[in-house]
Image: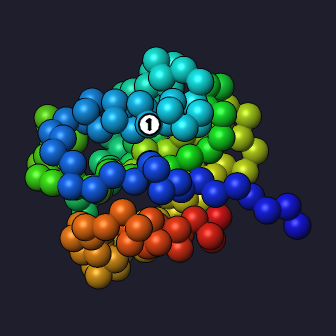
């Protein structure tokens, strides 16, 4: 059996961020993804993410958004996580605010649909009120990484 590379990297986990827009979050995580060589074009990756957002909002309720982009500029599938200090509206026309945001980057030629697997596994975990509360309240990146890595290991 071939060991799959981890999609969640501790360097892509950000806590207590004072961000207040979708653009701020996507910018932060895209900047970090380029630094870690997870993507090779920030501009093209962001275009893929916004193209997906135009199709339908990736705010899914429970104070969660899961934006994602499938692009040839993604070198390795990845998942970034941002915990927002003060929840904000992902889109201006939505009533619910977000505080937990997962950005998923998927290579264009992805054969195993890691983003769909992660979204499915994450959605199941996020039905657990205690897990959501843990992610909202966690103050240590290592603790957040450990909680998310439990999902990563199921991919």
Report the residue at 65% width, 25% height from top: 72
Furthest-right residue in view?
A: 1
Q: Which quadrant is the N terminus positioned in?
A: bottom right
Tally of numbered discs = 1
Front in this rendered view, residue 144 or 94 = 144
Residue at image location 19% in from the left, 35% down from the top = 21
Percent of width and height locating residue 99: 22, 55
Q: Quadrant of residue 46?
A: top left
Other-residue count near label 1 (Cα within 10 Å), few / some / many at <14 / 14–19 / ≥20: some
Residue 120, visible in the rendered structure: yes
145 sits to left or right of 90: right
Between 61 and 65, the residue placed more toward the observer is 65
**On-image quarter of the C terminus:** bottom right
The extreme top residue here reads: 43
Q: Which residue is mark 1?
A: 32
Tell me how the rendering is colored. Answer: rainbow
What residue is at 41 percent from the left and 67 percent from the top?
A: 142
Given residues 138 and 71, the one toward you in this image is 138
Task: Name the one closer to the observer, 69 or 96.
Answer: 69
Residue 101: x and y in percent read: 33, 51
Where is residue 22? Give x, y as percent: 26, 36
Query: On the picture, is 92 further left or further right than 117?
Result: left
Residue sitting at 27 percent across and 30 percent down?
A: 23
Give percent across and percent down for residue 47: 45, 21
Is residue 11 found left or right of 98 in the rendered image? right
129 left or right, relative to 10: left
Q: Secondary structure at mark 1?
A: helix
Is residue 55 in view? no
């Amino acid at each position: 059996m071939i060991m799959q590379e981890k999609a969640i990297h501790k360097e892509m986990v950000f806590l207590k961020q004072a961000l207040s827009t979708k653009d701020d979050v996507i910018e932060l995580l895209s900047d970090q993804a380029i630094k870690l060589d997870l993507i090779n074009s920030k501009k093209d990756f962001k275009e893929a993410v916004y193209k997906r957002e135009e199709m339908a909002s990736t705010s899914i309720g429970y104070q969660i958004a899961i934006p994602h982009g499938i692009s040839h500029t993604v070198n390795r599938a990845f998942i970034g996580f941002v915990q927002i200090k003060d929840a904000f509206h992902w889109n201006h026309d939505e009533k619910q605010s977000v505080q937990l945001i997962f950005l998923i980057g998927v290579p264009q030629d992805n054969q195993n649909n890691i983003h769909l697997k992660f979204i499915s596994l994450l959605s199941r975990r996020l039905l657990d009120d205690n897990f959501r509360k843990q992610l909202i309240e966690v103050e240590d990146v290592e603790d957040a990484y450990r909680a998310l890595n439990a999902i990563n290991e199921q991919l």
